[in-house]
Amino acid sequence: MTTANKVTILRILLIPFFIVQILYYFRTGNETHRFLGLISFAVAAILDGVDGYIARRYNQKSELGAVLDPLGDKLLLVSGIVLLSFSNQSYLKVIPLWFTVTVISRDMVLTIGMVLIHMICGKVMIRPRILGKIATVLQMIVVLWTLLKWEPVWLDYLVWGAVVCTGISGLRYVWDGMRQLSASPKSLPTPEQ
């Protein structure tokens, strides 16, 4: 168990605390819950960069980390985006439902694609793209901006930027996956007997 993996696990363990605090805030309007939810989300988002830095700097890249790190990102972002898209909460600006659907749909397509590639090719080769990282950062900023109750006009621009980066990066990952499938001998037509 590397230090980078321990940091990632800590980040994942912060997610239930974040969810509970935001749900209590929606129920009571108590600013303490919003503050604790905001801090836990911010710490988890910062730890995302910290675990990646540790893994690269100290050569602690591992197969476990390659699974846990994106899993931690997805769990944190999806939980934040879904919570903040509830239309029945009145204390924060609601994130548009189409944004939530875009993010979740992209992640579902990529997950299904990874499973398919793993089943056919045996190994999935994921090359992180800068646009995917920008999409992740913008999604985190959207959640933090909403939790901070900052100017809603700018939030709309952030949401659109995140959607564009999320959509384009998703298409790039799909394209990479199709190339991996095309290169596999198992993708070739079976000869007739």
Image (cartoon, rainbow, N blue to C red):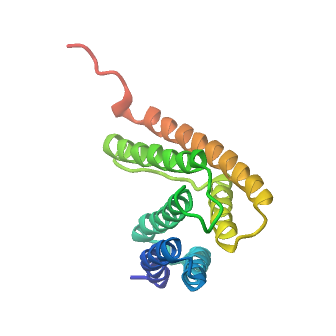
Q: Is residue 88 left or right of residue 67?
A: right
Where, by quadrant of the figure, is residue 139 drawn?
bottom right
Where, by quadrant of the figure, is residue 112 drawn?
top left
Looking at the picture, does residue 151 appear above or below residue 46? above
Provide residue 39's location: percent of width, then percent of height.
60, 82
Provide residue 141's location: percent of width, then percent of height.
68, 66
Q: Is residue 48 left or right of residue 154?
A: left
Residue lying at 66% horizontally and 66% vertically, measured from the top left: 146
Q: Nearer the viewer, residue 120 or 100?
A: 100
Where, by quadrant of the figure, is residue 16 drawn?
bottom left
Provide residue 119's location: percent of width, then percent of height.
31, 44
Q: What is the quadrant of the N terminus in the image?
A: bottom left
Looking at the picture, does residue 114 appear above or below residue 189? below
Q: Nearer the viewer, residue 60 or 43?
A: 43
Q: How many numbered marks are there? A: 0
Residue lying at 20% horizontally and 13% vertically, measured from the top left: 193
* Residue at far left of view: 193
Provide residue 192's location: percent of width, then percent of height.
24, 13
Looking at the picture, does residue 5 appear above or below residue 192? below
* Residue at far top of view: 193
Q: Is residue 134 left or right of residue 61?
A: right
Q: Nearer the viewer, residue 71 or 31?
A: 31
